[in-house]
Image (spheres, rainbow, N blue to C red):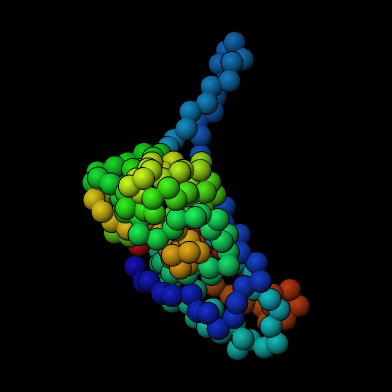
Amino acid sequence: MPTVAMPTTIKPISIDLSLNQPSRFSVSHSLIEQTRSREVGTWTLTLQYPPARTHSDYGAILGALAGAGGRSGKIIYQLPTSFMQSNSTDSTGIQVDGAGQTGRSVDVINGDPNGELKSGDLVQFATSNNFRIFILTSNESLGPSGNGTLDIAPPLHYETTNLESVRVHGNSGGLVFVGRPTEDTVGISVNHCMKYGLTVELVEVDL
């Protein structure tokens, strides 16, 4: 499957990152609702580009989408650091404390003593989880040795590697989003783009 990088010649004017966490839902004969999480989650990234003067302004984007080969390919896009800037007081030097961790929490170590990570921050694990992105679901105050437990969504399904770095978006640089196009067909209407701009939608996949 082809893997291409999203060009940066034109900057999006709007970035939307949404998380889909499907659940099983049913209603019993006694009309009691029953729900259960599937314990999976996938991000969708929507990039809205501004109106352009000519087709050539969007040529690099069209080339990247075509080069990905439709939904079978992969596109790499680095989120700008200004998007969802971290509010954490500690975002560098943090490492995973222990291999083989999965689920909705992960133990960390070697952060700043008594630092704090904030709910809503985006994080990524350096060597495992195939560049998947996770969001912190609660604040976490680190202990005197920089240790703590991060609550995350969606759940981890790939086992962590001991002492791998934990990247926090914004303060550790922009996280990398790996996604596939949502359509197999690639096309750009010059008249539409000149008036309304261009929208690109990518669904998260493993690198």
Q: Nearer the viewer, residue 50 or 182?
A: 50
* Residue pictured at 65% horizontal, 67% vertical: 14
Figure quadrant of the N terminus: bottom left
Figure quadrant of the C terminus: bottom left
Location of residue 103 with respect to 83 vertically, above or below: above
Location of residue 36 with respect to 203 vertically, above or below: above
- Whether residue 154 appears in this view of the structure is no
Q: Nearer the viewer, residue 101 or 23?
A: 101
Location of residue 16 with respect to 57 vertically, above or below: above
To which quarter of the image does residue 172 belong? bottom left
- Whether residue 109 appears in this view of the structure is yes
* Residue pictured at 62% horizontal, 73% vertical: 12
Q: Which of 128 and 106 is in front in this view?
A: 106
* Residue pictured at 47% horizontal, 67% vertical: 174
Q: Where is residue 129 in the image (x, y as percent from the top left)?
A: 33, 53
* Residue pictured at 61% horizontal, 59% vertical: 16
Q: Which residue is situated farthest in the right direction here?
A: 195
Q: Where is residue 192 in the image (x, y as percent from the top left)?
A: 72, 76
Q: Nearer the viewer, residue 42 or 163?
A: 163
Q: Which residue is situated farthest in the top direction here?
A: 30
Q: Where is residue 162 in the image (x, y as percent from the top left)?
A: 24, 50
Count of numbered circles in the view: 0
Q: Where is residue 48 in the image (x, y as percent from the top left)?
A: 64, 69
